[in-house]
């Protein structure tokens, strides 16, 4: 990509992420174009956007937004998911989409400037442990529940979704 095109991509990405305080980073490796378009359509219905950008450009823009830790996550295929009423709504919709498209995987989230990667998000927890953690922290739903729901496996995400109801 030429420097001019890189600058245009960076400017557009910065415009899109300008008012965003939280986002989710997903891995879409192995998902064909038709399935990814179905995921985008499902997200768009909930006023959530999925944006694919080159890793270097995404890291540059996220660093400019003050999310320097997010650079650690940008290896391989990545897409930024943002919008909706809250980041919890974004994650709930991603979990719902992951039921239809099994290869869709949540890698990390940035919540109010804080990076929650799979390890920090409780990737080693079993379904009953996730449900117990949720019950113990029900009052802190917006922040704590997200830190539990951002897990790398579909089974663990489904266990939490079932616990939430």
Image: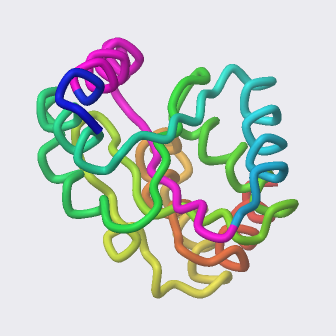
Quarter where residue 72 is shown: bottom left
* Residue 24 pos. (x, y %): 46, 46
Q: Going by the image, does 91 lie left or right of 7?
A: right
Residue at x 22% of width, y 37% of height: 113
Q: Give the magenta part as a residue range.
A: 7-30
**Above or below, comparing residue 48 to residue 108 in the picture:** above
* Residue 127 pos. (x, y %): 67, 81
Residue at x 49% of width, y 47% of height: 79
User: Magenta span has 10?
Assistant: yes
User: Magenta span has 50?
Assistant: no
Q: Residue furthest front?
A: 2
152 or 140, nearer to the observer: 152
**Above or below, comparing residue 141 to residue 3 in the picture:** below
* Residue 74 pos. (x, y %): 30, 59
Q: Going by the image, does 19 lie left or right of 7?
A: right
Quarter where residue 120 is shown: bottom left
Q: Going by the image, does 37 lie left or right of 138?
A: right
Q: How is the image coloured?
A: rainbow
**Above or below, comparing residue 107 to residue 130 in the picture:** above
68 or 125, nearer to the observer: 68
20 or 114, nearer to the observer: 20
Tell how many labels.
0
112 or 36, nearer to the observer: 36
* Residue 111 pos. (x, y %): 34, 40
């Amino acid at each position: 990509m030429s420097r001019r095109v890189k600058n245009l991509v960076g400017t557009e990405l910065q415009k899109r992420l300008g008012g965003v305080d939280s986002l989710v980073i997903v891995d879409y490796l192995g998902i064909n174009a038709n399935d990814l378009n179905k995921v985008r359509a499902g997200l768009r219905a909930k006023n959530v956007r999925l944006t694919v950008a080159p890793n270097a450009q995404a890291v540059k823009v996220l660093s400019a937004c003050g999310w320097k830790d997010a650079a650690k996550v940008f290896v391989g295929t990545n897409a930024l998911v943002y919008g909706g009423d809250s980041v919890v709504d974004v994650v709930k919709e991603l979990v719902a989409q992951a039921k239809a498209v099994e290869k869709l995987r949540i890698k990390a989230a940035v919540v109010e400037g804080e990076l929650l990667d799979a390890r920090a998000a409780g990737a080693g927890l079993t379904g009953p442990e996730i449900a117990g953690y949720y019950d113990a922290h029900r009052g802190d739903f917006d922040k704590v529940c997200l830190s539990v729901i951002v897990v790398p496996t579909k089974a663990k995400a489904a266990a939490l979704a079932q616990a939430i109801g």
